[in-house]
Amino acid sequence: MSFGVRAGGVALGYAAHVLLSRLLGLHSYGEYVIVLGWALVLTLPARLGFDNSALRYSTIYLEERRAGSLRGFLEVAACAVVLSSLAAGALMFLLAHWFSPDIPLVAILWGAALIIPIALLGVSSAVMRTTRRIFASAFYDQLLRPGLLILLLGLSFLFGGSPGTATALMFTAFAAAAAFLAGLVHLLRAFAPSLRAKADYSHWWEWFAVTIPLLIVGAMQELLNQLEIIMLGALASAGDAGLFSAAWRLASLPPFVLMSLIVVSGPLVASAHHRRDAAELHHITSLSARISLAFAVVASLMLLLAGRPLLAIFGPEFPKAYPALAILLAGAIVNAFTGVVGYLLVLTGRQAQALAIFAGALLVSLGLNLLLIPRLGIEGAAIASATALSCWNIAMLIYVRRTLGIDASAIGLQPRTARII
């Protein structure tokens, strides 16, 4: 089921960006993805790490039937994310206008407005996953949100012609808000018994002590995903950012099975670690890596063969992004090979170590982008992205083996110990 939802989400996301590129044209589409990149980068810190900590605390509170603690956690998470999203929106407006002054201010404002619903949607989806409602946890973000965006773009084209950058971002914000509200209704119904209990806020300091490192980890991870688009907008052109975005969107297909498995395995990993069961952790992580690697290899080969025609769907200029696509696919295969190492570190309480590794990868990416984009354009950005992605995955794989005694990769060496200390 998770696989099907993820596949549908990838298809709808691809269709939405194809429609956007066709309606906006290369330059305006480039402006759109630059603003969207800023919004996505700041959405992760706006969640304050509650999307990851929810996998731990909601799972434990549900297993131990601590309804008051669960309600307290959910209320604190919701209030904190709303406040941090407002701050992130203000920061985005300043940064995006500073680095890309040619983009219309109204477009940046709509991009900033996008942060609140996407941040809340991510947290509510994570909480839903802990109740084993896998379809519902992915439906609102992966299917409903891009589906509504496609609907709004289609209606705009039929009744008013091609939208501009600001209008496209407004539709994106509206679609995210509607998807979040629909998901919120589902979440409130699912947690109705727990929400009737008296809220227990006594562990609030522990929640924030865990989520603050997760905040920085999430911010760095999303910055690694979006850095090339932002830096292409600053060092090259909006058109180059648009070309890279199309290649990056296609290259996100091979790892989508891994992301589907993360949705399922996240609560299982949290539960196994809580019970100190190394054998179960090894089984979950190695099986996830093997399945994801098999799919990634096949999907990458297909994309190498059909990459140019698929890029041409975005517009006649986009096939020139094919070399960048080929480079990005190499990083995607390494990502699939190492499996769920990033989530494994976070869900086992090693977010500080994950932070250090992400920080190192971010420095690698930043340095390579500054060095290669002026010389190689989007191919240089692709090299920077694939190299940084490979570096942090391999570093985390080695660290997990040394500390947890588990080989989380597709090789799946036997664990060094039966229990985690």
Image (spheres, rainbow, N blue to C red):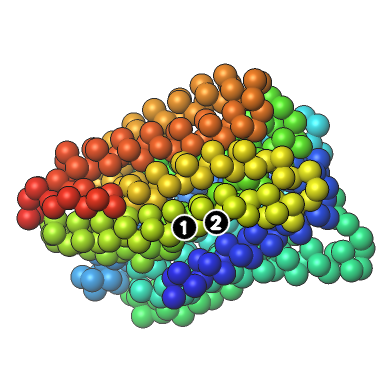
Q: Position of residue 4 (x, y in %)?
A: 49, 72
Instruction: Check if mark 2's residue and mark 1's residue have beta carbons within 8 Å.
Output: yes
- The residue shown at (19%, 42%) is 401
Q: Position of residue 402 (x, y in %)?
A: 17, 38
Mark 1 neighbour class, 10 Å CA radius: few under 14, some 14 to 19, many 20 or more: few
310 or 147, which is in the foreground? Answer: 310
111 or 340, which is in the foreground? Answer: 340
Which residue in the structure is indicated by mark 2? Answer: 302
Furthest toward the front, the residue is 305
Q: Residue 208 has which mark? A: none
Q: Position of residue 112 (x, y in %)?
A: 67, 46
Name the amino acid, label 2. Met
Q: Is residue 92 visible?
A: no
Which residue in the structure is indicated by mark 1? Answer: 298
> Is 92 on the left or on the right of 360, as rendered?
right
- The residue shown at (34%, 31%) is 356
- The residue shown at (65%, 20%) is 375
Name the amino acid, label 1. Val
